[in-house]
Amino acid sequence: MVPWLTPTLCAGLREAFQRVGFDVDGVPALLGPAAHAALSRDEPVPARLATVDAGPLGICIRLFLLGDTEPESAVAEALAPVAVADAVAAGLLRGGPDGLRAALDVRPHGDDRGGWWVVSDLDTRPGGRRAPLGADHVLGVGQASLSLASATVRRPVGRLLDLGTGCGVQALHAARHAGELVATDINQRALALAAATFAISDVPVELRAGAWLEPVAGDRFDQVVCNPPFVAGPPRVRHTYRDSGLAGDTVAARLVGALPKHLTDGGVAQLLACWLHVRGQEWPDRVTSWLPEQGGVDAWFVQRELADPALYVGTWLRDSGLDPASPQARREAEEWLAWLAANQVEGIGFGFVTLRRTGAAEPTVLCEDLLDTPVGLTGEEAVGWLDRVDWLRAHSSDAALLAARLTRSPDVLLERFAEPGPDGWLPVGSTVRRLDGPGWRHEVDDPGTALLAGCQGALSVGELLALLAAAGSRPTAELVAASLPAVRELVRHGLLVPVE
Ligand SMILES: C[S@@+](CC[C@H](N)C(=O)[O-])C[C@H]1O[C@@H](n2cnc3c(N)ncnc32)[C@H](O)[C@@H]1O
């Protein structure tokens, strides 16, 4: 049965949650830092102990966050004005001989400006054991959701599309900066739970049912966010949240090809994606071949993780609640690994794709690795990248770049490397690294190091290079030709910042 939480019931839940303090501030305040941290590690006992005799807020925490069964009278008091019978009929609660327990996961979720409530399916059995998930299971806020939310450009925009909204988390965050929100999903259960998320959180979102971009045919948006069912494997759907039904990375290829048509000029789409590393093919060649043939799109592919087939399949089988040693998981793993091997897949990359519709004759298309860095892509970094790409386009001629004044980012560190030699340390190279953001790092030679030292916003790049050429008795033209490509890269990664 698809749960149906009416707008009246959702408004009642909001009233109850606000009254008892079941929100982003009230829950951590009651639990305290240690029990709250333990709960986020899926260790329920400290939170259970902290909620003993904690009144209606304790009941809500045990009911919705710990999966406990609570006496009907206590639940009725905590959720008033919502009647327990209505909550059971809607599919929110389930009755049993010992009392009531949650049939859905409802939890506070927030950002630095406040909070909402997110409704999703439970992913644990009573008692805390992970169960294999149903085919139409609606995921709650997971790591992938959070990484897309934190990588999303948060500039004020008009219309925003959340494609594959699931529990509705991306749309909630988008409500901070978008005037009008449209959210789609193919899964009726997801649409019902997203509707509950939006109604309890009092965030107006237009929901549309359907596959991929069908529900928004002919529509354009200033921004699109999409955490699609990106898992790469054989063409089948075991779980709607995970499987697209399209073979391998076709879902990413289709979205990268089709999303730009749904963007207004200057509009930005961001999605999570997996791409196959196929024997004999470089991954950047694969992903950039997906872009629309007619061009007109700036594209940034950032590879955040790379897994071999065995690690990838095992990770996703566990994610769906299966024990990899169980007969079902063995069957699935055999089929999946056979498909990957038959398609010459040596690895599977995962990362962020940022697309911007541009009228520029020469769009910027870039593929980069961001493996092994603790900080992933942030929305701030994505905004910075888009702005820097614009700036570089406006300064694409050597003359324009030479006339520009640049300053070093204050968060840049010069690292010099040396190896032991017969007479002490032997210098072997230098890098400059940004200490903030994802920590972009570039090798620099001696003239590059000197240029960076001189970039303080007073002299133009051309003036600095002329001084360096004179000091090193080198022809200026030679130094300019050697330096400008590196200067462009340092600007693109925010190590050098234009002074306007
Ligand atoms: C990984 S979940 C993302 C949910 C949520 N947006 C988030 O960030 O946590 C993918 C969502 O895409 C939906 N989906 C799967 N196939 C789809 C399709 N063909 N068209 C639209 N949505 C689809 C699933 O039902 C699911 O809600």
Image (cartoon, grey):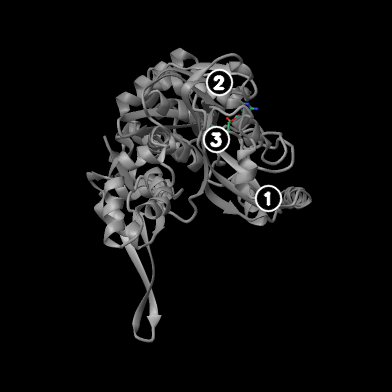
- Residue 317, x across and y down, in percent: 65, 48
Which numbered mark, 2 or 3, is in the foreground of this view?
2
> Residue drawn at (76%, 50%), measured in percent from left and top?
331
| Left or right of residue 456, residue 289 in this image | right
Name the residue nearer the viewer: 185 or 299.
299
Disc 2 secondary structure class: helix
One can see residue 104 in this view: no
Name the residue nearer the viewer: 91 or 234.
234
Q: Which residue position holds label 3?
A: 139
Name the residue nearer the viewer: 301 or 52.
301
Confirm if mark 1 falls within 8 A of ligand 1: no
Confirm if mark 3 falls within 8 A of ligand 1: yes
> Residue drawn at (71%, 34%), measured in percent from left and top?
245
Pointer 1 and pointer 3: residues touching (CB < 8 Å)?
no
Q: Quadrant of the N terminus?
A: top right
**Vertical placement of residue 337 versus 420, above or below:** above
Which numbered mark, 1 or 3, is in the foreground of this view?
1
Graded by Cα atoms within 10 Å as few (under 14), some (14 to 19) or many (20 or more), the crowding at tag 3 reads many
